[in-house]
Image: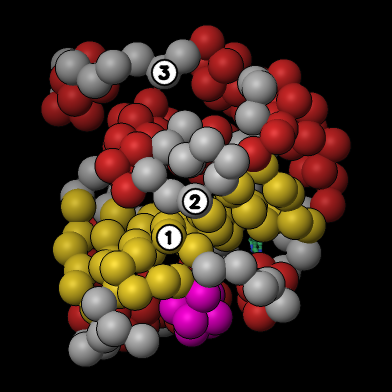
Amino acid sequence: MDIEEYIENHTTPEDEALRQLRRHTNLTTTFPRQLSGPVQGKLLEMLSRMIAPKNILEIGTFTGYSAYCLAKGLQDGGMLHTIEVKDEMEEPLLSFFEKSGIADCVTLHIGDAVDVVKDMDVVFDLAFIDGDKRQYPDYYAVVFPKIRVGGYIIIDNVLWYDKVITEPKHNDPYTAGIIALNDIVQNDPRVENVIVPVRDGLTIVRKVEE
Ligand SMILES: C[S@@+](CC[C@H](N)C(=O)[O-])C[C@H]1O[C@@H](n2cnc3c(N)ncnc32)[C@H](O)[C@@H]1O
């Protein structure tokens, strides 16, 4: 048994809707490892429940695993806006949201997150950034003004399989995007931030001023 397995064995297991979704994702998608999984999913759910957001923004829906986890923490009447660029995901996502009982509190936007977020007139309490790693700095730039002071941004894959230190010259654009955003966040005087080394690393950012 490795430490990841031990952690999973000592974390509340995913519910039936997530178990089925993970199975379906494994059978039907090319890169199933993209989904958050049981440990990160439970952490996202817990953080969302602690924040009790009215509005959540998610960039990168994929098959809806993290969306479902985040939606659990919404206040009554709250809304999760989730953005996915691949239009072929629309039908299976809407079907999953319906089946899993969260359709009333989830709005799915199909399009490029940078364009979609720019046009949104919503103040968010929580955002989860998990789209194309090359665009991470652009996501942060458009998401930041939409977050209320005191609100949170969670960013996924900030350790990028340790490449942030093993490939510091960051020649590939994915590693470069992540390293660039990690540095932007660390040097941003408007926020407090911490990296949580769960799975591939999550940064939690708290917006302290506009
Ligand atoms: C790592 S997966 C998201 C996993 C999901 N958040 C989860 O934890 O289960 C990244 C997703 O972002 C989507 N994506 C990539 N670029 C995007 C963009 N510019 N706008 C919106 N979604 C994008 C991809 O198609 C992919 O489905």
Residue at 24%, 44% in the rendered image:
198
From the viewer's perspective, is residue 17 above or below residue 127? above
> Splitting the image into four quadrants, where does ligand 1 fall?
bottom right
Closer to the camera in the image, 36 or 146: 146
**Pointers 1 and 2 in contact (CB under 8 A)?**
yes
Q: Which mark is in front, 3 or 2?
A: 2
> Which of the marked residues, 1 or 2, is nearer the chain's N terminus?
2
Residue 193 seen in the figure: yes
> Label 3: few (<14), some or many (≥20) within 10 Å?
some
**Residue at x 49% of width, y 63% of height:** 124
> Which one is earlier in the sequence, the residue at label 3 or at label 2?
3
Q: Is residue 86 left or right of residue 206?
A: right
Counting from the top left corner in percent of width and height, residue 164 is at 27, 69
135 or 72: which is nearer to us?
Answer: 72
Q: Residue at x 83, y 52 (%)?
A: 87
Q: Secondary structure at mark 3?
A: loop
The amino acid type of the residue labelled 1 equals: Asp
Q: Which label number is shown at residue 14?
A: 3
Tell me the quarter of the picture where residue 157 sits: bottom left
Position of 201 relative to 18 (above/below) = below
Q: Secondary structure at mark 1?
A: strand
- For the point 63% across and 52% down, the residue is 82
Between residues 146 and 180, which one lies in front from this camera angle? 146
Q: Give the magenta part as a residue range.
A: 138-146
Residue under label 2, please give it: 54
Q: Which residue is mark 1?
A: 125
Within 10 Å of disc 2 (Cα), the crowding (few <14, some 14-19, many 20+) is some
Quadrant the C terminus occupies: bottom left
Amino acid type assigned to the residue bearing label 3 in the image: Glu
